[in-house]
Image (cartoon, rainbow, N blue to C red):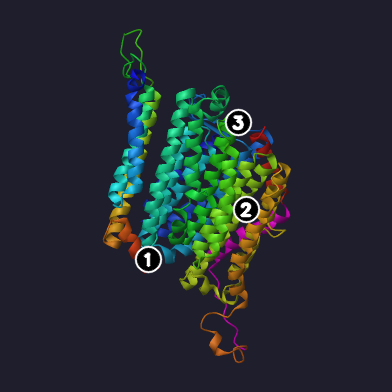
């Protein structure tokens, strides 16, 4: 049983996804229980795999007992166990959170199907992370994408349909590029197993075919990741999808795409490749990352809808992740990996709070946040913590990753990146301050005219989100602080992964 | 020159890829975009199947009793079976979206939908 944990990570959610709509016919709450239990099991399996990897080293699971490179291998090392825990934890938090939230954002009849597709989405993500076979990554990428499109379109807003359609077009182009890249790799090496590819590729590093393969793979994944010039599908998707979906997609989908890029760039290809490639790859990624950081923050400033603002801020945060990758140094990679964790928690918490506001008021304009500090104190406290972390205030987890990125850029002599990081943090502080100011220091809309004198004795009633939404929100927000203070645990894991990647 | 022409299937791959990509970007009609997307995906199928061809090889079906037969590489063909399934699912989901969009907006022309969305916001 223990031996088969890597396979169970995929099989359990996949089977549960089939059962969910069937038992949902009795009552939709049953399908919620299935999803919560299943994602919880995934989380426990991930933790147990982490323990195994830490104590006994990397795991290689042979699917059906076929020896790699002929059979499909599930290879688990420090890097993917780290991503696996982020994904399964956020999937669990999102599942618990969705129980009440989808009451307002999804039709009653669609709920069991929502949960079924949700599990397929998780299956695909886990599959991408756990597998050691590059064609398998493509298949799981498509499973994630297809269920992701459905999750977005399942909401009540009609704009969500157009967003999902555009995402489908972009996502399919990206995935097809990825498939083409795999084709070139197979053509040159005759293998699809990642470890085997890594061993065979070096002799072909100077060929044009391999360089083409690399370009197709990375561009395809960048579309999925929504790196700056390829981000156009994202704001509409995050804005119009149900809040629980936005939270989970922002917290897990983009992270797994980033993981796949790291895997392709540093495991399939080795750092040596970048010195032999016909033109220099590092500055291209670096410029795209810096452009993403600045453009994302500036565009977020201009938004009046909170969900759109968070989506553009995601564009900037993805820039940070790619920045760390493009520095190609151990500290940069640590910064990038820590930022994966950060951004999953911060964006998750922020979207959770927005979902709670939608649940109570039905509105997403920033204007509407005025005076909410009195009505929804706990949710807004979580929002404030996550926003501070987003800005990179010390003692929050956002500071840790920015610190590592800054240190890494000074180390390799690109000190000009430090002002870029500072400037973007400043912009982040500005666009979040607008909201925090409105939440805590401004009276609610329509209450200014009453005057404060006779209002004093009747305190505004606290009308916070229900417990099933508050608990995941507060947990995730508290983790932003916990990992900010006790950064040692994630950093040590990320460091191990980074050292292996950049050996 | 002859050598270049002999690889005609790869030329077709390139033509299909670019035609498909152009169609996806240039067309306003949502259904036509999906058709173009399918052309784009099909190009990759042809690419994989072309690479599996071995000179003088036959279909990878085991022939009883025959020795010294060269078979084509079956693996890319099997991979493409998966890719075909993925392609069909993608098309199905995309067409579902188009019917839903038509129901909500009453049109499947992209510019008109964007116009309607503008009034909504």
> Which element carries disc 1, helix, strand or loop?
helix
Left or right of A321? Residue A163 is left
Q: Are marks 3 and 2 on the same chain?
A: yes
Q: Which residue is mark 1?
A: B118
Q: Which residue is mark 2?
A: A342
Left or right of B6? Residue A94 is right
Q: Which residue is mark 3?
A: A270
Q: Residue at x 59, y 30 (%)?
A: A273
Which segment is the magenta one?
A457-486
The spot of residue A490 in percent (x, y) is 68, 47
The spot of residue A414 in percent (x, y) is 69, 45
Residue B26 is marked as none
User: Relative to the observer, which residue lies in front, A155 or A391?
Assistant: A391
Q: Are marks 3 and 1 on the same chain?
A: no
Chain under numbered label 2: A
The spot of residue A115 in percent (x, y) is 43, 54
């Amino acid at each position: 049983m223990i031996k088969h944990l890597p396979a169970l990570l995929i099989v359990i959610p996949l089977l549960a996804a089939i059962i969910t709509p069937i038992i949902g016919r009795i009552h939709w709450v049953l399908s919620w229980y299935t999803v919560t239990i299943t994602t919880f099991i995934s989380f426990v399996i991930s933790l147990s795999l982490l323990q195994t990897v830490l104590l006994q080293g990397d795991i290689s699971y042979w699917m059906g007992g076929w020896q790699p490179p002929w059979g499909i291998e599930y290879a688990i090392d420090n890097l993917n166990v780290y991503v696996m825990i982020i994904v399964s934890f956020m999937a669990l938090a999102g599942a618990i959170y969705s129980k009440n939230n989808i009451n307002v954002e999804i039709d009653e009849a669609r709920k069991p199907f929502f949960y079924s597709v949700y599990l397929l989405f998780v299956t695909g993500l886990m599959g991408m992370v756990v597998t050691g076979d590059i064609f398998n990554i493509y298949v799981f990428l498509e499973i994630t994408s297809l269920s992701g499109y459905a999750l977005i379109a399942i909401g009540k807003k009609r704009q969500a349909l157009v967003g999902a359609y555009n995402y489908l077009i972009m996502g399919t182009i990206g995935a097809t590029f990825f498939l083409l890249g795999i084709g070139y790799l197979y053509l040159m090496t005759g293998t699809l197993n990642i470890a085997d590819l890594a061993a065979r590729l070096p002799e072909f590093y100077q060929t044009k075919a391999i360089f083409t393969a690399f370009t197709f793979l990375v561009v395809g994944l960048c579309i999925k990741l929504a790196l700056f010039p390829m981000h156009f599908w994202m704001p509409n998707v995050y804005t119009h999808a149900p809040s629980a979906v936005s939270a989970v997609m922002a917290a897990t989908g983009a992270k797994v795409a980033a993981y796949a890029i790291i895997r392709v760039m540093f495991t399939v290809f080795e750092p040596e490749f970048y010195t032999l490639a016909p033109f220099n790859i590092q500055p291209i990624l670096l410029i795209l990352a810096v452009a993403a950081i600045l453009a994302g923050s500036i565009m977020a400033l201009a938004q009046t809808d909170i969900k759109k603002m968070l989506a553009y801020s995601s564009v900037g945060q993805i820039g940070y992740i790619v920045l760390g990758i493009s520095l190609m140094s151990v500290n940069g990679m640590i910064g990038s990996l820590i930022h994966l964790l950060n951004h999953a928690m911060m964006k998750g918490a922020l979207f959770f709070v927005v979902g709670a506001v939608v649940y109570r008021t039905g509105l997403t304009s920033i204007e509407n946040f005025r005076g909410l500090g009195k009505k929804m104190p706990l949710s807004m406290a979580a929002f404030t913590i996550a926003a501070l972390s987003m800005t990179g205030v010390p003692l929050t987890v956002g500071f840790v990753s920015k610190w590592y990125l800054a240190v890494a850029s000074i180390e390799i002599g690109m000190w000009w990146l430090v002002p870029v990081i500072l400037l973007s943090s400043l912009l982040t502080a500005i666009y979040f301050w607008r909201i925090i100011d409105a939440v805590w220091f401004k009276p609610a809309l329509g209450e200014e005219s009453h005057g404060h004198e006779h209002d004093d004795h009747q305190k505004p009633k606290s009308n916070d989100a229900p417990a099933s939404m508050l608990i995941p929100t507060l947990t995730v927000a508290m983790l932003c602080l916990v990992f900010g203070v006790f950064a040692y645990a994630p950093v040590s894991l990320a460091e191990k992964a980074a050292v292996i990647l950049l050996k | 020159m002859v050598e270049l022409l002999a690889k005609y299937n790869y030329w077709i791959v390139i033509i299909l890829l670019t035609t498909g990509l152009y169609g996806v970007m240039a067309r306003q009609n949502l259904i036509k975009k999906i058709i173009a997307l399918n052309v784009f995906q099909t190009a990759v199928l042809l690419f994989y199947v072309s690479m599996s061809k071995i000179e003088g090889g036959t279909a990878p079906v085991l022939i009883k009793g025959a020795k010294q037969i060269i078979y084509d590489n079956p693996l890319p063909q099997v991979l493409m079976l998966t890719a075909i399934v993925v392609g069909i699912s993608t098309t199905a989901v995309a067409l579902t979206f188009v019917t839903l969009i038509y129901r909500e907006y009453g049109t499947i022309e992209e510019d008109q939908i964007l116009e309607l969305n503008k009034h909504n916001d």
